[in-house]
Image (tube, rainbow, N blue to C red):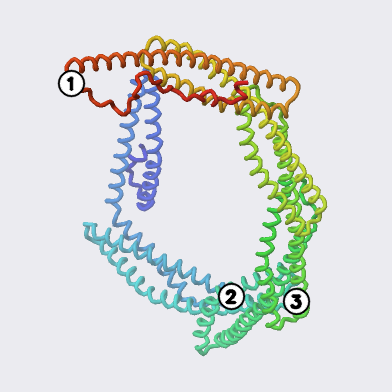
Amino acid sequence: MLMARDTSRDETQKLHKKWLKHQTFMAELAQNKEWLDKMEKEGLRLMQEKPELSELVKKKLEEIRECWQDLESTTQAKARQLFEANRADLLVQSYSSLDQRLEQLEGHLAHVDYGQDLTTVNKQLKKLQTMECQMEEWYKEVGELQAQAASIPQKGQVMEKVSERQAGVETRIVRLIEPLKERRRILLASKEVHQVGRDLEDEILWIQERLPVATSQEHGTSLQAVQQLMKKNQSLQRELQGHRGRVEDVLERAGVIASIRSPEADSIRAGMEQLHQLWEALWTETEHRQLRLDVMYQAQQYYFDAGEVEAWLSEQELHMMNEETGKDEASTLQLLKKQLVLEQTIEDYAETIGMLSQQCRQLLELGHPDCEQISKHQSQIDRLYVSLKDLVEERKSRLEQQYWLYQLNREVDELEQWIAEREVIASSTELGQDFEHVTILQEKFTEFASETGSLGQERVTAVNQMVDELIDYGHGDAATIAEWKDGVNEAWADLLELMETRGQMLAASHQLHKFFSDCQEVLAQIEDKQRRLPEVRACQGGTSNTSTLQRLMQTFEHDIQLLVTQVRQLQESATQLRTVYAGEKAEAIAMQEHEVMQTWKELLISCEDCRMQITTATDKLRFFGMVRDQLMWMDSIICQIGTGEKPSRVSPGWSASPLSPLPLPWPADWVLLWPTTLLS
């Protein structure tokens, strides 16, 4: 604050220094403004944290703020006073200082130094650039001083002095513009000459460093080595292609300088010719080396591919020599599938062999130095491939034969097991407990025999066909296969024999049980007829119509006539069964037959009695009817006589004698219709 309010005018102290000192003070004041802001933030934070001190802090902050505003206003006021009071003196001093600096610059421009090499020229250019920057700054400063001078209202000696200084400075600045431009042009020309020489030397050195790589006779002894050399040469070619623009630019710039007659141009022309020759040589050698490496790469690529092909063929040959054929059908099938895949892979590998052969032909056409060795190598690979295909066929044949053998073994085992299961059913001794049971058994066995016969014969035929095909194919285990065939056929023949025996046993059992069933059925029918006889007898007293009794008796006798065939069949069946069975079953057959025949005889006797009764009743009814008819006829005749009418002619269908016998209602030989065997 004291410095801001200091208004003393010490004549010994220069006004310019005062002004500079005051500006320094203003800068320091601006820097402390941040400190004031920080203090206010701390005060606000303190008031938030401790509200009880907020009044005190707020008061202190207001005092500091007032003091700071007072300090700023005082400083600005003093700055205006110094500027307004001493602006003219400051302008004079500024022009004087600027004039001295321009005079020093004229002295530097008077000393001519164009540089001996590129480094010194660059140093001179940097100095010139510094001078030019100073001239621009001074030019701007003159403009600012002119603006300040135009804003000074005072008139008098001070302003005349200012005008005089201003005119001198402006004249000196105008005189310095052309020398600066000339100095820059000369230095740039000298720099271009030295730069072109340096560039020519650099490019020549760059080409000389790469020329040994391009002219190298090393071509590699393996594919990897050739590839590395090709990569290096290709990298060199790409580097040359990318560097071509640089060389052409240097040659173009050197050509411009070489067209000028000067001592420096002679060295430039010599360097330009050397660079051109080296560049053409490097480019040509690089192309030639690329061609040589391409030829060598093709040969090494062939050797590499041939080595891989030989290794692959040898590896596959080892696989083909494997004698493993699988422990069972599944493992053999898996091996066979792998073999088929491998066979297809080897078949597809023929394309690779063909491509390798094409590479060999190309190398032979190019006349490669190793043509003879390459041709022998290719012939060896072809022989290996043919040998491998033969091994593939042999191993495939072995696996197929083994698979067919396992498959045939499985079919034979399954068929034998199936036959054994069928034999269990065919060898069953169950013959049925009754007629229905044996009928069910016989139907099931018939279905079983039909299914077994068709399916079994089909499977046996398929197995025999497989065996015959394998034997015809020349299978290594033909003897074992033939034994399997014989075993299957024997088992099948045994099964057929068992089924035939079982069928006969069931047929005999069916006949026996059918006999017993028929006997029971006939007995039931005979008993039914026995029960119906009382009904027929009951109808005798309840009807007076002889035709009704005759029809009833005829119906009953017709039903009995139907039983005659069944009884006769039972007798025939019993006769046949007695020739087959013996012991208890024979006794049972005889007892059953005797029971049926006894019941049948009883039925016939009862039927004969009933017939006699019906005949007697019918004769009686017929007699009564004839008597009634005769009485009626006599009554009619009497009536006719009494009336005197002539009697009408007697009907020709009527007997002349009223006492002629009536016809019988059944044939006289009716009893002769019954079989004598049944009546005995």
- Mark 3, residues whose alpha carbon is within 10 Å: few (<14), some, or many (≥20)? many
Furthest residue in direction right, as rendered = 479
Q: Camera-side residue: 590 or 64? A: 590
- Relative placement, left or right, of 7 versus 265 is left
The C terminus lies in which quarter of the figure?
Answer: top right
Which marked residue is nearer to the observer: mark 3 or mark 1?
1
Which marked residue is nearer to the observer: mark 3 or mark 2?
3
Q: Vertically, is 76 above or below 192? A: above
Q: Position of residue 131 (x, y in %)?
A: 44, 68
Q: Mark 2 points at which residue?
A: 240
| Residue 437 in view, yes or no | no
In the structure shown, which secondary structural element does the residue marked by tag 3 occupy?
helix
Q: Of the numbered discs in the image, which one, if any, rests on residue 645?
A: 1
Q: Name the residue under label 3.
A: 374
Q: Which of marks 3 and 2 is nearer the N terminus?
A: 2
Residue type marked 2: Leu
Between the residue at mark 3 and the residue at mark 1, the CA separation in whole angstroms equals: 158 Å
Residue 519 found in image quarter: top right
